[in-house]
Amino acid sequence: MDGAAKLAAMNGADIILDHLVKKKVPYLFGLCGHGITGFMDAAFKSQNQIRTISSHHEQTAGHMADAYYKVRGEPVATFTSCGPGSANLVVALAAAMMDSSAFLAITGNVPTGQFNRGPFQETGRHFQGDFPSVVRPYVKRSFQPTRADMVPLAVSQAWDLLTSGRPGPVNLDVPLNVFVEETTVPPVQGSTRMVNGAPGNPRELSAALDLLLGAARPVIIAGQGVILGHASEALVAFAEAARIPVVTSPNGKGAIPDRHPLAFGAIGRNGAYAANDATRNADVILAIGFSFDDRATSAWLDGYTLSVPPSRLIQIDIDPSEIGRNYPAEYGILGDARASLELLAEMAPARIAGGRDAIAPWLARLEQGRAVWREYQGGLALSDQVPLRPERLMAALSRAVPEDAVVASDVGVHHNWIIQLMDCLRPRHLIHSWGFAAMGFATSGILGAKLAAPDRPCVAVVGDGSFLMTPHALATAVEYDIPVVWVVWNNQGFCSIRDIQHGMFGGRELATAFEIQRTGESYSPDFAMMARSFGVPSHRVTHAGEVEDAIQTAIKANRPYLVEVPVDRDIRPIGTGSWDLPPLPPPEPNFLKALAARGLTL
């Protein structure tokens, strides 16, 4: 008997589960369907090693996996069936891809023997079993083993690809018969994973450091790559050693604690005043793990958030496609964020002779801008009006939510307020869908966040519009006893888009306010009652003074809980940057005018 014949036979699904168990994957998130039943049978047999969580919509499963990675930095897997099942996952895949968040999407397909025959739910008009083409723009790669003996290599390569280089989701698309057919081919041994961790070119880093230390107005922009690269400690060490102010991209919030003396907030369209002031007036900028996207740069409009040139740019990134893509880099350095920052911190002390007194005026200017910004926002947060001022609700969240909590923001105008006013104290304190801005991310993803951090309170701040897109997440929370809190920011509309209509189209609005069409009366479901119908305790805030207590009570309940808060939809975030939707004229920053109107000055 030859060696192959002595091997125990395994079906394709068991091979996949065996690989996931060896990688210590704790959860599978997904939804049943005929095309995935072979895989589900293998999951049934592995219940004592990997837990299956069934959601009520595939999008929720994907957002849970995305959030799990954002909080823990470790990927899990999803499972969905052919046709609409896996198509429902696409929004979550796209959101994860654009935020460099990793999970393995295992999708079932029709049996290979039925390819090209138009079976139930086949995506096959142009190519047989063609779901990989559906997700091609939204995954790092799609693998489709069409025989059981192809599965070991496919699952191994797919898993390794998740976190090599820039993280992202990967698709493993498996026909039904391949899940259940057996093979004696042994699993692939070892790993092909590329190990991150090499710093950028030392000579280039050394020259870039000289440029940075010689600057009168230097600034560091920390992007999400600092968080993904576990580089926050190295960032703070370097900034302190060189006494260089730090700002973050909105997606990099938490890369440095917002209360650190050298931290001046997030930049861009909804950035803090001192942050945008720092980057548009800097003579040298060090950008690390930052993609220079439109909302973070005021849509590349010169002089609003950035002026490159004349500002001289040093850019460090692990992804070569990002370097120089939107702004010319004087030093474009390909390297790992943490390793590069550690090397910079090691080199810096010897080059700082006589201290850093030359940049004292620069730091004083930014400190003054930060203090006036906080004074302005703090005054507005004292209001007790109902519906609440957004600043009042943000202040309540800051007081009520423990500092060790995970806060997930859904997409909407409330997200803009969170970027402006939430103090992030550590990496992964705030998670959100940034690049794709997928509504429903936080409503659903908060479940994955809690499973990733079971000992930390997990609070989702969700708009009424985004909450209505995936409210079935409440049912999953009850079924699996996942104790999370939803704070529903109820402003009776899709108000981020309503604000665009008002600002750019002369106040005309259509299909953005929630109202009874027959009467024009503002409309809102009773979210507190809706939650109770799911079996979720709830509270509907009726006056501003009870917000903190309501949120604290929800967290202490240690069970799924919803707090509904009415918010004034006609109060808009103050502008310190801009955003461009050509050919419409970009809005001008209005913070300085608002400051003067309240008798405050810089």
Image (cartoon, grey):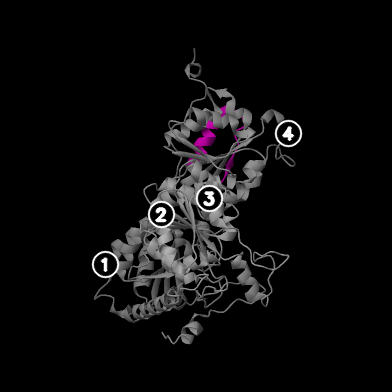
Residue at 52% over, 36% down: 155
The spot of residue 50 in percent (x, y) is 45, 35
Residue depth check, mark 3 versus mark 2: number of the one nearer the observer: 3
Residue depth check, mark 4 versus mark 2: number of the one nearer the observer: 2
Work out how far the residue at label 4 is from the one at label 2, CA to CA, in angstroms: 48 Å
> Are there few (<14), some (14-19), or many (20+) residues within 10 Å of tag 2?
many
* Residue bearing mark 3: 532
Horizontal side of 567 relative to 338 (left or right) equals: right
The spot of residue 32 in percent (x, y) is 59, 36
Mark before the other along the chain sequence, 1 or 3: 1
Work out how far the residue at label 4 is from the one at label 3, CA to CA, in angstroms: 41 Å
Q: Which residues are magenta?
A: 140-159
Residue at 50% over, 65% down: 542
Work out how far the residue at label 1 is from the one at label 2, CA to CA, in angstroms: 45 Å
* Residue bearing mark 4: 119
Above or below residue 291? Residue 94 is: above
* Residue bearing mark 1: 349
- Secondary structure found at label 2: helix
- Secondary structure found at label 1: helix
| Residue type, mark 4 in image | Pro
Residue 51 lies in the magenta-colored region: no
